[in-house]
Amino acid sequence: MFDQKSLKLFEAYDRQSLPSGNPLQLAGALLRAPGQLLRDLGADERVPERAAALFLLSAAFCAGYGAILGLFSGGLQPLMAAAKLPIIVTGSALLCTPTLYVFNGLSGSRLSYLQTVGLALLMSAALGLMLVAFAPIVWFFGVSTEGSAFMKALHLAVFAVAAGFGLRTLNVARRYMEFRGGSAVLGTGLYTLWSLLVVLVGLQMAWWFRPLLSQGPFHTGQRGLFFDFLIGS
């Protein structure tokens, strides 16, 4: 069921510990030692503490990247983008949590709803962490170029990489929980379907809360689909 590479990785996770649950330590754990965090979520231990810390991490990371994103336009846009981006990223993850919970149930998982929230926030926190990793590069191009088309393409590429990292983190988490518990957590097909759903919701949230790269109101209230942006209408 698990290849040798996965078995070695999960065995390494088994040896990892995380004595405290403060957000800064969890940020490091997302990259280097997520074993204890995943064990806590899977075993229903300290889940409210872990979920709260992951929520704070996700919001803080996304707000930081949003502020840098908004610097391209200046004015109040850094503050507005810093407020919008956590809503878009973390809000999309939480909005899709009920679907994740049902999909988990269909896969035979016994995770509680709060544990499922923790998994969704794990994904959004990992996504936010990758956004922060690209923040210095985005800042440099933002202050050194006036090309809005290039900046849009750059941000789309960064978000694509960050979303891929966040979903990969969720995939590793579900497989590790299956490794430790022996029961399926979000089967592969349902994981793929949920990944597509959360990306679609995120794109629609970004469309609904636009603009991000130009001056404008916090929320226009205009209805539409993100396809309108992609086809340029």
Image: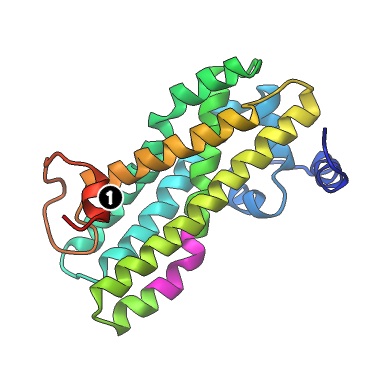
Q: Residue at x 68, y 41 (%)?
A: 172
- How many badges with numbers are in the image? 1
Looking at the rendering, the stretch of residues picked out in magenta corresponds to 131-138
Q: Residues within 10 Å of mark 1 (few under 14, many from 20)?
A: some
- 96 relative position to 109: left or right: left
Which residue extends farthest front? 231
The kind of residue on which mark 1 rests is Ala
Q: Residue at x 24, y 55 (%)?
A: 231
Which residue extends farthest bottom? 144
Look at the picture and state if 132 lies above or below 199: below
Main SS category, magenta section: helix
Q: Secondary structure at mark 1?
A: helix
Look at the picture and state if 91 lies above or below 217: above
Image location of residue 20, percent across then percent down = 66, 41
**Residue sitting nearer the eye, 165 or 61:** 165
Image location of residue 62, percent across then percent down = 40, 53
Can residue 152 be seen at all in this image of the molecule? yes
Image location of residue 3, percent across then percent down = 84, 42
Magenta stretch: includes residue 214: no
**Residue sitting nearer the eye, 180 or 207:** 207
* Residue bearing mark 1: 83
Q: Residue 69: which quarter of the image?
A: bottom left
